[in-house]
Amino acid sequence: MIRLENIHKSYVTGNNKLHVLKGIDLHIEQGEFVSIMGSSGSGKSTLLNILGLLDVHDEGSYYLAGRQIASMSETKAAQLRNEYLGFVFQSFNLISFKNAMENVALPLYYQKVSRKKRNLMAMDFLDRMGLKEWAEHMPNELSGGQKQRIAIARALISKPKVILADEPTGALDTATSYEVMEIIKEINGEGITVILVTHEHDIAAMTRKIIRLKDGQIQEIIRNGELGRFRHTYMKELETA
Ligand code: ADP
Ligand code: MG
């Protein structure tokens, strides 16, 4: 589904050049459930934005569903985003002056689906998230957990193959985080590839592959069944913190 070969990314501001990703090689198959961990500033969001075609890499190759991304027009990238990708963010990114149903329906508006049909579909997805009764409510009338479930419904409505989530539980309390992770797990169970960024070890431990970034490089990849090793490194980190 996703293949990265020797990806580099730098940000240039004025005379300064910050080399953020320093040669990332990564292969993610359809249906995987992956987390990206690393300390603040290690390049997690940069990597996720490149995967999501929200930013472009400087060097190396990125293949999404067999297609090479380099030198792709913005129109083509937008088309691939629509066809393959769904996004979930820490701060939900709901539109404040639209109600829950309209927020969920929004991607279909850009796909020129009729209002009636997109609202019906939005209601279906809200129902799946247990939020049907909240359809007419505005974002500021909803709790953090409800807002994130609406954002997830919005990500799902265009039937993506991959969900990219940047700290989806970062603004939620522990109990709500676990509820949201249950939903994300279910989505993955239906065959959708999930890639999420987190700096919380308990959240990462719910995924099946943990990619640890350090200083713009992959430090290690921990697969399902090796979580014992993950806990061991984690405990060592705590001891030395
Ligand atoms: P993480 O998500 O792991 O905290 P980021 O990928 O957001 O890290 O950022 C990695 C580094 O790149 C940080 O030092 C950050 O300040 C810098 N950075 C991120 N985005 C930009 C940008 N658009 N312009 C300049 N520097 C940036
Ligand atoms: Mg980040």
Image: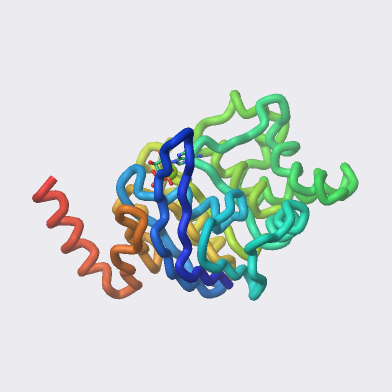
Left or right: residue 127 versus residue 18 is right
Q: Residue furthest front?
A: 15
Q: Is residue 112 visible?
A: yes
Query: Which residue sits at x=54%, y=41%?
Result: 148
Q: How many marks?
A: 0
Q: Pick the residue in front: 169 or 238.
A: 238
Residue 86 lies left or right of residue 78; in this view the side is: left
**Where's residue 96, x and y in %?**
66, 26
**Given the current orientation, which residue lies at the most extreme left position?**
239
In the rendered image, the quadrant that contains the C terminus is: top left
Q: Determine the residue positioned at 53% across, 43% down.
A: 89
Q: Residue sitting at 44 percent across and 64 percent down?
A: 34
Residue 215 in the image, given as x and y percentages of width and height? 31, 53
Against 65, residue 11 (above or below) is above
Splitting the image into four quadrants, where does ligand 2 fall? top left
Location of residue 68 (image quadrant): bottom right
x%, y% of residue 60?
A: 51, 66
Residue 213's x, y, as percent? Answer: 34, 57
Give above or below for 1 relative to 22.
Answer: below
Looking at the rendered image, the quarter that the N terminus falls into is: bottom right
Q: What coloring was used for the rendering? A: rainbow
The front one of 93 and 114 is: 93
Residue 24 picture quarter: bottom left
* Any part of residue 158 in sight: no
In the foreground, 164 or 183 = 164
Seen in the picture, residue 48 relative to 219 is either above or below; the reply is above
